[in-house]
Image (spheres, rainbow, N blue to C red):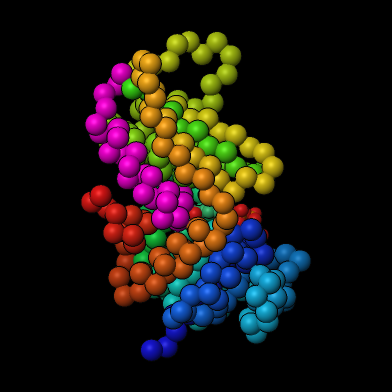
Amino acid sequence: MAPIRIAVTGAAGRMGRALLTAIHETDGCTIAGALERDGHGDIGADAGTLAGIGEMGVPVTSDALEVFAAVDAVLDFTAPDATVEFADLAAQARIVHVIGTTGFAPEHETRLEAASRHATLVRAGNMSLGVNLLTALTKRVAQALDTDWDIEIVEMHHRHKVDAPSGTALMLGEAAAAGRGVTLDDVSDRGRDGQTGARKTGDIGFAALRGGSVVGEHSAIFAAEKERIVLTHIAEDRSIFARGAVKAALWGQGKGPGNFDMLDVLGLSDF
Ligand SMILES: NC(=O)C1=CN([C@@H]2O[C@H](COP(=O)(O)OP(=O)(O)OC[C@H]3O[C@@H](n4cnc5c(N)ncnc54)[C@H](O)[C@@H]3O)[C@@H](O)[C@H]2O)C=CC1
Ligand SMILES: O=C(O)C1=N[C@H](C(=O)O)C[C@H](O)C1
């Protein structure tokens, strides 16, 4: 069988390089395109050389139209404005668009929803097996406990991260809210500062720490009188996200259009 042809957007980024490496290390797929933004210093460089896996004969380009027309799947960990443009291209090309980008605003969500009528979108704020399992566990624990248990989501990331709370923190918050049978937007408490007043019963709080080179750490904390449950995931290397993204690209082949997530890919939807 011919290998699945996969392209990477944001190829020179932290995740872009990890994604190129993961495709290279996975049987049944091949690096078939590498995109960077117009004017980026690595345009024209060999994608394999960029990722440190040896020359692949795939130059980094900014011609997204050409790349999307020539591949079966695109792995996209870039920025919200770029990702919605890529989703439109994936819809035109009827291919699998694996979206790891975080920090979307409601207007981006609307564009992605529209694109999913023609493209196979697989989206998750975190593509690692561990975090998706943690998400399922968080929902179950929230289901089992009442509002005597305060829920707080705490995350820490490297100093370069531009969005907060992280996509993963929002996934965990959504899962906790779903477990409680409420909508996250109605109970979310972000960015406490100054005279905040006492904590409101039933709120789900978020705290974001930034510093150094931390790949990603997340905890869902359930705090009651005299006891606490802390569910934590620590990412030690970006390869865990990249391997999940490649798995999603392979899983999406032949699935048809729609909006999927990593729980679908990992078979954890009913966990
Ligand atoms: N879902 C998941 O498992 C994970 C998600 N992320 C998310 O992925 C995104 C990227 O993270 P990093 O790699 O750390 O950032 P980064 O800043 O290192 O890389 C982003 C790359 O995208 C490129 N880019 C921006 N606009 C572009 C465009 N229009 N066309 C082509 N390339 C474009 C940039 O030039 C840059 O090289 C963030 O939103 C982050 O939160 C990161 C890790 C895991
Ligand atoms: O920006 C990052 O680095 C990460 N982003 C994702 C997020 O927003 O949760 C996933 C991971 O934690 C790393």
Q: What residue appears at the point 36 percent right and 69 percent down from the top-left corner?
A: 252
User: Does residue 114 appear in this view?
Assistant: no
Occupied quadrant, residue 32: bottom right
Quadrant for the N terminus, please: bottom left
Q: What residue appears at the point 68 percent right and 82 percent down from the top-left corner?
A: 55
x then y, percent, for residue 167: 48, 45
| Vertical comparison of 167 with 180: above or below | below
Q: Nearer the viewer, residue 227 or 115?
A: 227
| Vertical comparison of 175 with 62: above or below | above
| Vertical comparison of 197 with 236: above or below | above
Magenta segment includes 134:
yes
- What segment carries the magenta color? 124-148
Q: What residue appears at the point 46 percent right and 68 percent down from the top-left corner?
A: 246
x then y, percent, for residue 40: 72, 64
Q: What residue appears at the point 62 percent right and 45 percent down from the top-left corner?
A: 214
Could you tell me how many numbered marks the image carries? Answer: 0
Question: What secondary structure predominates along the stretch shown in magenta?
Answer: helix
User: Does residue 184 appear in this view?
Assistant: yes
Magenta segment includes 73:
no
| Vertical comparison of 197 with 202: above or below | above
Q: Nearer the viewer, residue 230 or 245?
A: 230
Q: Is residue 4 left or right of residue 19?
A: left
Q: Nearer the viewer, residue 228 or 8?
A: 228
Q: Is residue 158 left or right of residue 148?
A: right
x then y, percent, for residue 264: 31, 58
Which residue extends farthest right? 41
Which residue extends farthest front? 226
x then y, percent, for residue 56: 63, 82
Occupied quadrant, residue 38: bottom right
